[in-house]
Amino acid sequence: MNNYRKHFRSTFKLAYPVTIGQLGHVMLGVMDSMMVGRVGAESLAAASLVNGLVFLVVVFGLGITLAITPLVAIAKGKNDSEQCGIILRQGFLINVIVSVLLSIFIFVAADLIFFLNQPPRVASLAASYTQILSLSILPFMLFQNYRQFIEGLHYTKPAMYITLLANIINVFGNWVLIYGKLGMPALGLDGAGYSTVLTRIFMAASMMLFVMNSRRFSEYDPSLKFRSINWFIIRKILNIGIPTGFQHVFEVGAFAFSAVMIGWLGSKPLAAHQIALNLASITFMFILGISAAGTIRVGNAVGRQDPQRIREVGFSAIFLAAGIMAIFGIIFIVLRKYLPLLYIHDSEVISLAAQLIVVAAFFQISDGVQASGLGVLRGLTDVKVPMIISFFAYWIVGFPLGYLLGFIYKRGAVGIWIGLLTGLTVAAALFTLRFHLKTRILREPPAK
């Protein structure tokens, strides 16, 4: 237990800056919505539509960047500074290419919004906003590339500071470009898009300059002086990044299409769903920090070739996530009738949201375990089987069960949420079992 207490402290020390940074990313979107909402309901509706659609694409690119962290952590565990630098530079090359491809896809796909049966004005605003946001993918991916690099080296605070500062820049950019201040034209929703592009350019430039000019990273040669294309490292990054990207798409897609199903039930169930999901999303930021810390620490232990430490670090991250989310679950149950009042005063929506929040309380623990389990498996560079598990848990179990309970058995939004809960629970159990089996094999002595 003394070992686990030490691991809890070490994991939390790495995790909390990631958590604050993730909350900062969420606040970027929240402030965009709040400031765009003052322009009009059509602009807010267009922003909501676009953010959901673009995120489904961007999350794949995010998965590619996440491959950098475990590889750097493993190289660091081996005290191989040169390898760390090679991973950074080859990751830069990959992420530039992937981001350009994603940008082109998003820019071209913007015209498809007109076929989504949206009000004409909303569709027009959304298409323009989408094309502007496509310009922000490259700086976003470059920021992530350098962020994942230094996080693999156990430096999680710089990204937190840059993200918090980016919120100030984004709000100022929104104020100038959305409303037409300081002599600039009022661009409305498009102004929010341009502000996002400028903010992400600031984030990428700040992170790159920090890494390239900080003495603490000089031993890794973080410059852009490519000696050659290292196909071996590129394959390793893609072998981790592509399955991780698809895993994120499977998970995010399940939640997105569950929202579509709840929309079939009417506006009030959808409003209740948004309230419960927003609350769950806020607490999930804490787990993203633990998941990232689990990846870093497990990867470092892999590099040291220390099987016992791998298990202790991995399971301590899973236990810490479960404990924190259990506390949030209790808070959700106790405050289930009061939390919806932060969003709305419609009694029917509040009543339904309270029911969903109870499901979300149990959902918390499963979500915490699956996210942290996925993180520690990524630290082992084990991503292909987890990708298959994600598809099975969310699309073979969770999504169909949600439809069955919601529409065949007439349980409505609660039934759909029970489907999501079941999918998360299956994923959590299988990820944990997978980590146990993989690390037990590592501990077994070789056969004579």
Image (cartoon, rainbow, N blue to C red):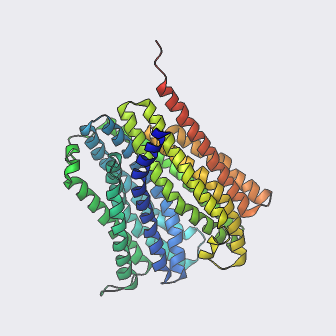
Q: Quadrant of residue 432?
A: top right
The x, y position of residue 186, in whole percent, is 38, 85
Work out whether 174 lies above or below 364: below
Give the camera-side residue of 4 and 47: 4
Residue at image position (47%, 49%) is: 291
Give the camera-side residue of 109 and 160: 160
Q: Is residue 436 visible?
A: yes
Residue at image position (49%, 59%) is: 285
The x, y position of residue 43, in whole percent, is 50, 79
Residue placed farthest to the top in the image? 448
Callout count: 0
In the image, is 164 to the left or to the right of 393? Answer: left
The x, y position of residue 41, in whole percent, is 54, 81
Residue placed farthest to the front in the image? 2
Q: Is residue 223 visible?
A: no
Give the camera-side residue of 217 and 259: 217
The x, y position of residue 198, in whole percent, is 32, 70
Residue at image position (54%, 80%) is: 42
Work out whether 234 lies above or below 98: above
Residue placed farthest to the right in the image? 409
Work out whether 252 lies above or below 347: above
